[in-house]
Amino acid sequence: MTDLSVPATTPFRPSMLIYDRRYRSMTFQVIVFILVMALAWWLVNNTIRNLAALGKDFNFGFLWQRAGYDIPQTPIPYTSNDTHLRAAAVGLLNTLIVSILGCIAATVVGIIAGVARLSKNWLIARLMTVYVEAFRNVPLLLWILIVFAIFTEVMPPPNAFRGENPTASMILFDNVALTNRYTAIPTLGMTNDPGSLDLGARITISWATLAFAVVLVAGWIARRMIGAWAQQIQDRTGSRPTTWWMSLGVMTVPSLLLIWYFGLHLIPPTLKGFNFTGGLNVQNGLVALWLALTLYTGAFIAEIVRAGILAVSRGQSEAAFALGLRPGRTMNLVILPQALRVIIPPLISQYLNLTKNSSLAIAVGYMDIKGTLGGTTLNQTGRELEAIVLMMGVYLVLSLSISAGMNLFNARVKLKER
Amino acid sequence: MKTSVFLGTVAAATLMAGAGMADTLADVKARGELNCGVNTGLVGFAAPDANGNWTGFDVDICKAVAAAVLGDPAKVKYVPTTGQTRFTALSSGEVDLLARNSTWTFSRDTDLKLDFIGVNYYDGQGFMVRKDLGVTSAKELDGATVCIQTGTTTELNLADYFKANNMTYQPVNIDSNAEGEQQYMAGACDAYTTDASGLAATRAAFADPENHIILPEIISKEPLGPAVRHGDNNWGDIVRWTLYALVAAEEYGITSKNIEELAKSSQNPEVQRLLGVTDDLGAMIGLDKDWAKRAILASGNYGEIFAANIGEQTPIGLARGLNAQWTQGGLMYAMPFR
């Protein structure tokens, strides 16, 4: 015991910083800290020096200058007279549009492919294996370019829809035209337009859209309440009342009434001049990027789903079968809820990947934030550092938001241990 | 100890990086090679041939500068740059000289910290359409889909032109001329717009050039010229006067064929000064006496370079027009060598 108290009384020598276990870890931590700080200092200093040598400053004033260029797809009103800031906002919205569409579609594709790969049907399982392996092992950029090239080279130009005997024709009752530039789809028109709510900065939202949103949310809440009421009756009497027609009613009838009230109808696109007008022209860049991102990320999600299902032990499904549950209900009530716990965390990182991968958009001329802020704006103003720093910030915030949202969801479905 | 050595190295490296920016001539000489930023591929201006050798109107500027500075027109490393990357490549020091049909504008000259040293091609923006479209004027392009290279002045001109004429259009943003060509050929856009010289060069590479027309409207001024970094005036002078030497050579009738003979026999004092027979102009810009002679020998004078790459005898078939000598009614005008 006395041995232990001896070192405390020995005088401190510098060599103890390396040879004495008590100080050694501290020494290395300090050295690493200094090295990291020196590297950071060097990077910052180098940047400042080189900027000074070029006579440039670090200044975000360019964001309020006139942009001067046009953007093909503008979710909010934008003209070339607007500022670079608004152009960046348009780009950000375009990034969000393709990311959200991509995440939803990739999840659907991934779950179907993941479950199908476990199918007992030999052909389906093998087909899904081929899909997963083909998409996982070829770079995303190639898929984007391939899909885009197929659209550009195979689809007819708008001109082919013209004349007495056109070489191409519209599909879905003359409502949709697939061309080598865009997919022309109908827009919604209203005979009884209630006007729009002005959110400022020339962003408006139609009252009709708001009305539908309110009605749908209310319908969803009403459906939950009907479910709870049915559950109550079941708990009390043992027999569950038939509620599907009630649920269907509260979900659809108010919406149908709104459609009738606003006089909602489809306005099909018509060929006028060089292009289709009247409808909505969904650019091939968006479709190609969305399809490629969906199929690529879907392949990864399929593997995650498969792993999640395989992670649920066989005993669970055997027990469910022993209780007499049919395979469909076994999957829905027993296997999937448990598999989700395994699936959600890696799924988050796939969503993040998809969002970040959407920055490949410029390859197909889709103007996302990399195309506007990090492309044309950067090039016209010469503010490389500022634009890149801003973009890094935007992607960081975007990724952290997705992460936070999905973590909340994960907290709800994960195993509650008591 | 370790840390201080490291910090010392870092400090020294930073200082050298800072100092290295200033003297491009010394850098190029030490490297023994000129890094020249060129187009990724625009036939006639800068494009690699089947053997990977770069040829073209802009490439010959690189060769002339390399010949003047290093004594060998082959000592050039060509760095292909897109419309997006070209200025960053120049300002970061990746290239010493940017000869890539870039338009001289106010903001590029000032805010982007470039120095345009002259104009080697006076150009303007035009539109190319298929003949069977039946369009004869750019004013008829209302509602058209237009392919446009992103990050160029043409992108801004296009927006201004359609706005000024109260017309609408659908832009298709593309990254390089090759991509634009592909999109235009596939019919993904009705019109392709870029500098008229670029359109002519692009059309020349088509299998059926006769089925495409370049509309008569020229919607902008596009003075294309080589650019260097702002702040190194001596290097800027060298490139500027190399270009003037090529232009002056044409004016005085000096060609790559007769240059040796003229150096010996010419009694024209201007020619003698230019070729270093009498005065030593090279010393004033840190080069030797024969710098201009070597620059002209590299690919010939301005007229020879024009004729060989983009002139009327080539598939591109551009007339001299504004780019004729000032004595022929054009804008090519070399400052006096004195």
Image (cartoon, coloured by chain):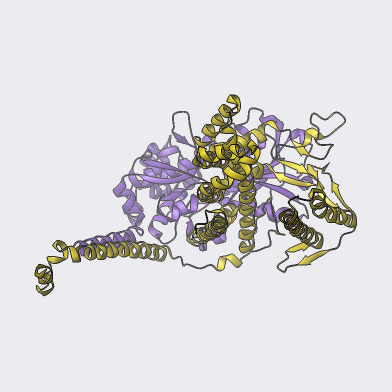
Q: Is residue A375 left or right of residue A220?
A: left
Query: Outermost residue toward the top?
Result: A123
Q: Picture quarter containing residue A411?
A: bottom right
Q: Position of residue B136 (x, y in %)?
A: 77, 40
* Residue at x 63%, y 47% (from the top left corner): A104
Q: Position of residue A320 (x, y in %)?
A: 59, 40
In this rendering, is residue A284 above or below A30?
Answer: above
The foreground one among A312 and A76 is A312
Q: Which hue belongs to chain A?
A: yellow
Check the image and name the residue furthest to the front.
A237
**In terms of depth relative to the viewer, which is nearer, B4 or A254?**
A254
In this rendering, the answer to whether B64 lies above or below A380 is: above
Chain letter corresponding to the colour purple:
B
Where residue B174 appears, x then y in whole percent?
A: 60, 44
The N terminus of chain A, quarter of image: bottom left
Considering depth in this image, is A300 or B334 the residue closer to the camera? Answer: A300
